[in-house]
Amino acid sequence: LVGFVFTSALIAADVPKIPNPVQAPSMPQLVKQGQTGLNIGFINSFEAMRNCKEGLKIAQGIEAKRTEMTKELEEDQNANMKLANDYQTKATVLSETARQDMEKQIRKMRSDYETKVKESQYELETMISKDTEVLAHSVEQACKPLAEANNLDVVIDEATGRTFYARD
């Protein structure tokens, strides 16, 4: 994972143990304050995924797909509006059968459009989910060598609260 590093601000210093465990603050407060007696590194996996080269490439791919889908949906919506406007203009001069056929065609186009919108949303959400999972795995795998190089005992993801690394 290129471009993914711990910053000095995210690496907690080696600090002494808690003086009075009875009155100790909660564990999340201790971790944030660096008062656990451990070298603790923090990472924001969402930020790391968003800013790494692989994440930027994936984001561009997702944006291109979203733009493509949006264009197709706009074209379909314009076709629906044109048919509806044609119906409005011609409705008074059409025979009952022709009017019913046109209304049926409008309903079908609207239904097809709504289905296409839902399918496009699902496809985009699936693509994002799959790509995010791949990136998250890459971030997690990159943590171990970086944590060892920085002599960290634990690496915690600020975004999810998950432990990405714990010294054996």
Image (cartoon, rainbow, N blue to C red):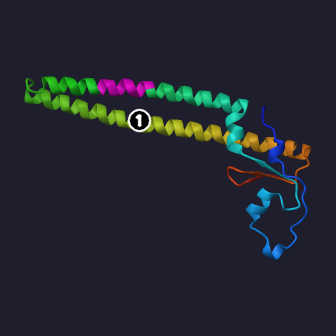
Residue 91 appearing in the image = yes
Q: Quadrant of residue 162?
A: bottom right
Q: Quadrant of residue 33?
A: bottom right
User: Residue at (75%, 39%) from the top-left corner?
Assistant: 138
User: Residue at (72%, 39%) from the top-left corner?
Assistant: 48
Range drawn in magenta: 71-80
Q: Quadrant of residue 19?
A: bottom right
Left or right: where does residue 145 sit relative to residue 160? right
For the N terminus, the image quarter is top right
Return the x and y of residue 92 as percentages of the image width and height.
Answer: 8, 26
Q: Nearer the viewer, residue 116 or 46?
A: 46
The three-letter code of the residue at mark 1 reads Val
Task: Report crowding for label 1: few under 14, some 14 to 19, many 20 or more residues within 10 A (C-alpha).
Answer: some
Above or below, 46 relative to 22: above
Left or right: where does residue 138 sit relative to residue 18? left
Return the x and y of residue 103 as percentages of the image width and height.
Answer: 19, 32
Left or right: where does residue 93 sit relative to residue 148? left
Magenta highlight: main SS: helix
